[in-house]
Every structure is written in C-alpha cells, then in structure tokens.
Amino acid sequence: MKKKAKILLITPNLKGIQDGVNRIQPSLGLMLIAPILEQHGHKVKIYDSALDGWNKRKVLDQKNKIVMIGQDENGISKIISDFSPDIVAISVLFSNLLDSAHEIAKIIKKVNKNIKVVLGGNHISSAVSDFKYFNMQKNNGVNNIIHDLENSHFDYGMAGEGEFSFIKLVDAIINNDENNLMKVPGLVKRISYGKYHINPNQSVHDLNLLPRPARHLVEMESYFDIGAFHSAKSRSKRVLSVMCSRGCPEKCTFCSTPTMWGQNIRWRSTEHIMDEIENDVKDYKIGEIQFEDDTITVNKKNLFALCDKLEKVGLPWCTPNGTKVNYHFNKQDEMYKRMFNSGCYQITLACESGVQRVLDNIINKRLPLETIYPSIENAKKAGMLVHTFWILGYPGETYEEIQKTVDFAMNSGADSFSFAILSPLPGTPIYRKVITENLWWPGRSLDDVLYRSSLIKVDGFDSPEDFEKFVNETSIKANLSLKEKDPKRFEYKYGKGSTEKALVHQT
C-alpha cells in the first residue's frame, strides 16, 4: 500500500514598489495541482506568504523604493512547523520572486532538514531551457549552470506543466522509490556541479482532464479585500481569474510563453470552462472575470462559443494579457462585437512597437504596423475600452525608434497604455542575446526585475535611472491624454476623481 504525504504548496513573497500598486492573485498553477494530490489521498495546504504578510514591507532599496512584501522568517517557520509537511513545492512564476524562494527553502531546511523541497513554475522551466541551449553553443563564455539547483536547499526542480507529473514525484519520494523518481517527467536533479539529470517535460494534451481550481484551499476573501488582480483597472474587487487555453503560435523573441506552454494551442471545452465559471461565480459572489490566456482570440469558433455562454452569465470580463492585434483582421467587427455583447468591457492589444523594423527584425512579431490603428478603432466601435501594451528598450532598438514608438502610441486612439521596459526573461532569445553579449547596465542583473526597471543598456540614455524616468514620464503623459481628449470616456474608465498618481499605478 502506497504511503500518503503532507504537501505544502507555496508562492513566495513579492518584490514590489513601496508606494505603488503591487498586484497579487491566487496561483492558478497551484490550485490545479492541489486537487489532483487530494484525489490521490495526500493532505495539501496552499500558502501564499506574500498574502499572509501583505502589510509587512521590508525596504530593500530606499533610493528606488523597492520593498519585499510578505511574511517574515518567524511567520514562515511557524507555518512549516505547524503543518509539518513531508514535501514543500515553491512556485516561482517570475525571476524577481527568486530571492524569497531561496530564503523560504533555507527556512524549510532549518525547521526540518528531511523535508524535500521542490522548485517549480515558469522560472525553472525557462532556466532548464537556457541550460540546454547554452550547452549546444561552443566557446560562448557563459558559465552554464542551473543556479537555483546549485543551492543545497532545493532537492529537485520540476519543469513544464506539473499537474500530472508532480503527483508521480510525490508518490516516488514518499515511497522511497528511487527508480521511478528518476523517470518522473520534467524532473531536474543536481548530480554534481553543473551536471544535472533532466527528464523531458510533460504537457497536458487534453485540458479537460484538469480539475476545477482548488479555490477552497486559498484565502479568496483576502485577495478580494486587497483587490489588486491582474487587470490594470478592474470593474470589481471580486475577480475570478480563468485560463481557457494553453500555448501560443507566435515566436516573439521577448516572450517565454512558447518555452513554458508550447506553440500548439490547446483549448478546454466550453462546457469545462463554464462549469468552473458558473460554480465559482456562485460560490464566491464573483463580480468580474479576467481571462489569463495568451491567445484567447486566436480560435474564433471557440471564442464565440464561450461568448454565447458568457452572455447568459451577465458579468463584465476583460483580457489583461495582450491579445494579438491582427487576428481575424478582416472580420474583427464581428469578433469584437460578440465579445462586447457577452460582457467584455476592455480588450488589451499587444502592439509592442510603432516601428516595423523593430517588429520584424528584433521582436520577430508577425504584425503589420498598418493593422494597429484600425484594430484599435474596431474594438472601440464595438463598445470596448482599449488598453495597449508597448515595450521600450529592446537590444538593437535606436533612440529614434523609441521616440517613434511613443509618438505612434500617442496617436493610436487607444484609451490607455502600459509602457514596459524590456525585461530579458529567461528562456527567450533576447535573454540569451543579453547573456552572450553582456548587455546589462553596470550593477544591474536579473535579480532586479521589476515593472519598469531597466536592466540592459538602451541607446541614447546614460543610466538605467534616466531611462526609467523617461518611461514613467511617458506613461503619465500618455494615460492623461484621454482626460484631455474625452473627459467622459476617461471618467467611464477610471471613475470620478482619479488622481494622477492613482492613474499611473492603474496602468
């Protein structure tokens, strides 16, 4: 008879801005893994240390107002001691969570050195992908190791989609089954310095096999009270985050989605999606739905089937992730109208640049520049607000091209703008270029990843602080332009009395 385990699933503290809006929401990944573990008889606890210590702010950088948000060592130690897990899995979505993840792993081993600690999430998947890539390159001068697994506090890494592979790892660990443990899909285990046992990832080909997310295991009311979900400006604090599909057919050089989720699009059935939505809307008195898909508009048939059902639910919804601008370009009027009629109050369009050379040669984004303005207008005519994503500071982008992108965005007719500074995300071609050519600003590294933090050198600017100031000022100017052009639409989007400070943080 197989033994049963006590498993603690953790999302670590957040690195954020002292006076800014720092966003937090429950982890969909952990909420999908948890019920599968429960179905196999294991006892599971999900713990968000940032949520638990939301009002605690440890200053990391007074000058730049960077803080660590979340529970302190004593609080985390108590959680571990009280639950007494056999296995702890720490999920790291972005690299700026790593400092906390390493600290938590250290705390775990301090409480009980026999607890097995597993590192999962997008970051380790991308790190493994980079390790494989640089291993194939000769004489590139890169010290090619998986840094996190060189830390003795982590026993294993799990790359790829973990819902059905993590249960195999748990069973192997708790039953001391070393043979099957080394066969677990996605397993990454350190053998010696720079040497690792790496198994191929496992993808969930049929997303209808996934359970309903275990929202009963997280503090939903605490997330609602904070009300800082993904979308820049939500209609309700009681948000339900839903993912309908996985994968993206694009190959943008700055994006890690293809590394994590692949380029083949997999959709859940409409019935499967609506079972989650209808039940959780009722159970948690949901006031808004936010779809976290990378490509929710790529399959029009599936989108329309979903819209038909959402219309009956009658809740506002939006797409906080950027959707591809020119999907179904010749029939956008119909698509956007169907979305609006089903409750979509805002669509986010991933424009990225206002220069065709940058789109073609640097980003590798299949996007004709001339489709951006009409797409924005089509969405507005359908009745939706239009939020837009733009990225500044790509390696190889000139100062003049940065200015052209700003001007192009300002004249686009969009309602709001997120001007992001390029972050070289692990697992992406741009990250590999930055590593190989050492394009970092002096004193900056991946550890400094934050929204609007400049990590790599930018043409025309003398320091990361200069570029950060430029982007922040650009964001303020762009997002206040709606107030001048259309005060009523501005009030409809942000509400009455929005201050300049709040406005910048919302976008």
Image (cartoon, grey):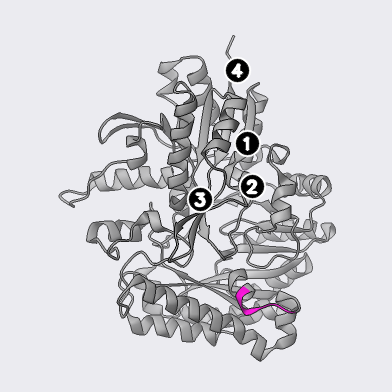
First in sequence, mark 2 or 1: give its number.
2
Q: Quadrant of residue 307?
A: bottom right
Which residue is the site of mark 2? 26
Which residue is the site of mark 4? 4
Tell me where residue 314 appears, x and y as whole percent.
83, 61
> Nearer the observer, disc 4 or disc 3?
4
Measured in 3D between alpha carbons, the distance from the residue under mark 1 to the one under mark 3, in whole angstroms, is 30 Å
Left or right of 497, for residue 11: left
Quadrant placement of the C terminus: bottom right
Which three-letter amino acid code belongs to the residue tagged 3? Asn
Residue 264 numbered tag: 3
First in sequence, mark 2 or 3: give its number.
2
Measured in 3D between alpha carbons, the distance from the residue under mark 2 to the one under mark 1, in whole angstroms, is 10 Å
Q: Is residue 434 above or below residue 77?
A: below
> Nearer the observer, disc 2 or disc 3?
2
Tell me where residue 342 appears, x and y as whole percent.
78, 64
Q: Crowding near pointer 1: few (<14 within 10 Å), some, many (20+)? A: many
As helix, strand or loop, the secondary structure at mark 1 comes to strand
Residue 425 visible from this viewpoint: no
Which region of the structure is painted magenta?
Answer: 497-501
In contact (CB < 8 Å): disc 2 and disc 1 = yes
Residue at 65%, 69% (x, y): give it. 347
Which residue is the site of mark 1? 46
Which three-letter amino acid code belongs to the residue tagged 2? Pro
First in sequence, mark 4 or 1: give its number.
4
Measured in 3D between alpha carbons, the distance from the residue under mark 2 to the one under mark 3, in whole angstroms, is 26 Å
Identify which residue, 119 or 296, lies in the foreground: 119
Magenta stretch, main secondary structure, is loop
